[in-house]
Structures are given as structure tokens and as C-alpha cells.
């Protein structure tokens, strides 16, 4: 464990130049005293680490020293798929491997390439969790990830339509979409998709999974998503809406129609947008209050008007 930490410390110094003891302690998840002892160990091993005194001090490598210890082990290489996605990597148990792999990649870069990478990291950040939400708890994710990595069958309890069902599956891959994790698996010869947050328990079995020839997870997910969207036809709704309510409307409509909402408009506009269901459209549009008027379909307009009248009647004594 300490050897790995010493290498990580050395790579941080190589990539970032001078680094404070506090920053190193935070990154390595140890105390500043432990960082000091680790630096002393590196110096004793012949690595030219210099301690810089003062408020802006820290540690740095002298004389342009560079280590060649940038080779990755298999766990670190596996974590590379999550570059820029630290939280999902942490959920899968790859957080530490990802951090070390990133340090090694940065350490391997030189000159203009390193500066370009540093500029990119400072200007772009990836956050897979939707607005006004938090990632769903996924206690079964680590076990499912183990089964995916090792190509082993699983027996799980899955909550569907309020009931718990037991399933034996051949897991093929995990997908993170809009902040939610999904398991792509084979069951009885058919490809299925399961929302990981609905998995109550997982048992990884001592049975191997034979992956289908030519299977591609990205393509399989696109097909599964297409089937899901096809099973739930969207409802088209035409509204007249105030300009300042457009950003809120954009967050409420189905993802497939968000680009239809002109969030830069300055006047009242008419727009036709999709919703997943009529009941959700009614609830969402009522939440926008007087800023929106439903024009079509007529059935939804009548339902919204009736609900608005009932709400107004409830507050009649407040006028």
C-alpha cells in the first residue's frame, strides 16, 4: 500500500510541479505528517524532492527529474474508460485506480501535450447527474460490476410494478444514462435491460457467462432504448408560454423534445413539445401556473382548466 502511495506522490510532483503538503495529504487521503515521512523515504531512495518553506511552500522535484514508473496495471487500465467521470468510477469501486491511472497518463505527457491536457481539464467538467437531482442509491452495483468483469451469472431480486421477482441472468454490461445505472443482460435467450436501483439483492454465481459473438454494449443499449421509447408513445402538447418560464418548461418535457423549447425567446411564444404521459403533462404544466396556457390537445386543456378551477376554489377565502 505504501509503495503505491509513494509512486502516486511522485507522479503528482512530476505532473504539477510544486505541491503543498496539505494538497498532497488531501489527494493521498493521509495526514500531512505521513506525507512528510513519505517524502523523506523518497529522498532516502535518491529521488531529489525539495521542501520549499514559507506560506506558498510545499514540495517539488529538483533538476527536471522525471520517473519512468508510468506503466499501468490491469485495474488502472480498466479504469481509463471513466476519465472525467470520477463519481461513477467510485460507485464501481474503481475510484483509486482511476486516480492513479490519471496521474500516470499526465506524467507520461510532456511539453505542449501536457499543457493542452491541463487546459482541457481546467475548462471542461463532466457531470452525469441530472439537474435538481442526486444519483439514485445503487447498493447492488458493486456486485453486478464484479459479475460483469468476471463473466459470471447472477441471481437477483428485482422490484417491478411493486412486486419482487427473482431472476437468474447472464450480465453483459452496465450503462450509465442520465444519472441512472442499467444492467444489460441475457435471460432465457433474450436480451433484457434492468434498472440497477431496483435490484434488492445480488448473488454472484459460480457459473460462467458465454457472451454472444459480436456483442457491442453501445449498440445493444441503443436498441434497448429504442424499444423502450417505442413502447411508451409520447403525447404532443401545444402551449402558449411566457418567455421567462421557458427554461422551466425545457426541464419538464421529454428529453427527445427539449431542443424544441426556445429558451432565448424574449416574448410569449407558442410551442409544441412532447411529454411522456398525459398525467405527467397535466401535473408539470399546472406547476407553471399562469405562465402557461395549454392549447392542445383539447382533453388536456380541459383537464388543466378543471384542476386550476378546483385549486382556485380551495383558496377562495384568501382573496
Image: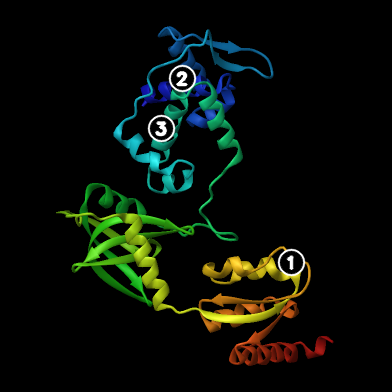
Q: Please name which of the two marks, 3 or 2, marks the residue nearer to the observer.
A: 3
Q: CA distance from mark 2 to mark 1?
A: 52 Å
Residue 110: percent from left, percent from top: 49, 21
| Nearer-N-terminus badge (3/1) | 3
Relative to residue 277, is residue 150 drawn left or right? left
Nearest the camera: 285 or 1?
285
Tell which tag, 2 or 1, sits nearer the viewer: 1
Callout 2 crowding tier (Cα within 10 Å): few <14, some 14–19, many ≥20: many
The residue located at (33%, 65%) in the rendering is 193
Residue 271 position, x and y percent, is 66, 76
Do the numbered discs 2 and 1 sit on residues whose CB atoms are within 8 Å? no
Residue to which mark 2 is pinned = 10
Element at label 1: loop
- List x then y, in percent, for residue 231: 39, 78
Q: Residue at label 3?
A: 101
Quadrant hosting residue 230: bottom left
| Mark 3 surroundings: few (<14), some (14-19) or many (≥20) residues within 10 A | many
Residue, x 32% and y 68% (percent of image)?
158
Quote the CA–CA distance across marks 3 and 1.
45 Å
The nearer-to-camera label among 3 and 1 is: 1
Q: Write down the residue under mark 1.
A: 265
Compared with 33, 246 (above or below) is below
Residue nearest the viewer, comparing 128 with 298: 298
Amino acid at each position: 500500500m505504501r509503495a503505491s502511495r509513494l509512486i502516486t506522490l511522485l507522479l503528482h510532483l512530476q505532473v504539477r510541479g510544486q505541491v503543498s503538503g496539505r494538497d498532497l495529504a488531501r489527494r493521498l487521503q493521509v495526514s500531512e505528517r505521513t506525507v512528510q515521512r513519505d517524502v523523506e523515504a523518497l529522498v532516502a531512495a535518491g529521488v531529489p524532492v525539495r521542501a520549499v518553506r514559507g506560506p506558498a511552500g510545499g514540495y517539488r522535484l529538483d533538476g527536471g527529474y522525471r520517473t519512468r514508473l508510468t506503466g499501468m496495471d490491469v485495474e488502472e487500465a480498466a479504469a481509463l474508460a471513466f476519465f472525467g467521470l470520477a463519481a461513477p468510477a467510485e460507485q464501481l469501486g474503481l475510484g483509486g485506480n482511476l486516480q492513479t491511472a490519471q496521474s500516470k497518463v499526465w506524467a507520461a505527457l510532456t511539453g505542449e501535450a501536457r499543457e493542452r491536457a491541463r487546459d482541457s481539464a481546467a475548462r471542461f467538467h463532466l457531470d452525469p447527474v441530472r439537474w435538481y437531482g442526486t444519483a439514485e442509491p445503487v447498493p447492488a452495483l458493486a456486485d453486478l460490476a464484479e459479475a460483469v468483469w468476471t463473466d459470471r451469472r447472477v441471481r437477483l431480486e428485482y422490484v417491478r410494478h411493486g412486486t419482487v421477482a427473482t431472476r437468474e441472468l447472464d450480465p453483459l454490461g452496465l450503462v450509465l444514462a442520465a444519472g441512472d445505472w442499467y444492467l444489460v443482460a441475457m435471460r432465457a435467450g433474450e436480451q433484457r435491460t434492468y434498472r440497477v436501483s431496483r435490484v434488492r439483492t445480488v448473488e454472484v454465481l459460480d457459473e460462467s457467462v458465454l457472451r454472444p459473438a459480436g456483442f457491442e454494449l453501445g449498440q445493444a443499449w441503443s436498441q434497448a432504448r429504442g424499444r423502450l421509447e417505442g413502447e411508451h408513445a409520447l403525447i404532443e402538447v401545444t402551449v402558449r408560454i411566457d418567455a421567462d418560464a421557458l427554461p422551466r418548461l425545457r426541464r419538464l418535457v421529454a428529453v427527445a423534445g427539449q431542443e424544441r423549447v426556445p429558451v432565448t425567446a424574449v416574448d410569449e411564444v407558442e410551442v409544441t413539445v412532447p411529454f411522456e404521459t398525459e398525467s405527467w403533462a397535466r401535473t408539470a404544466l399546472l406547476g407553471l401556473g399562469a405562465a402557461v396556457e395549454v392549447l392542445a390537445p383539447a382533453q388536456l386543456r380541459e383537464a388543466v382548466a378543471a384542476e386550476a378551477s378546483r385549486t382556485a376554489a380551495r383558496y377562495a377565502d384568501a382573496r
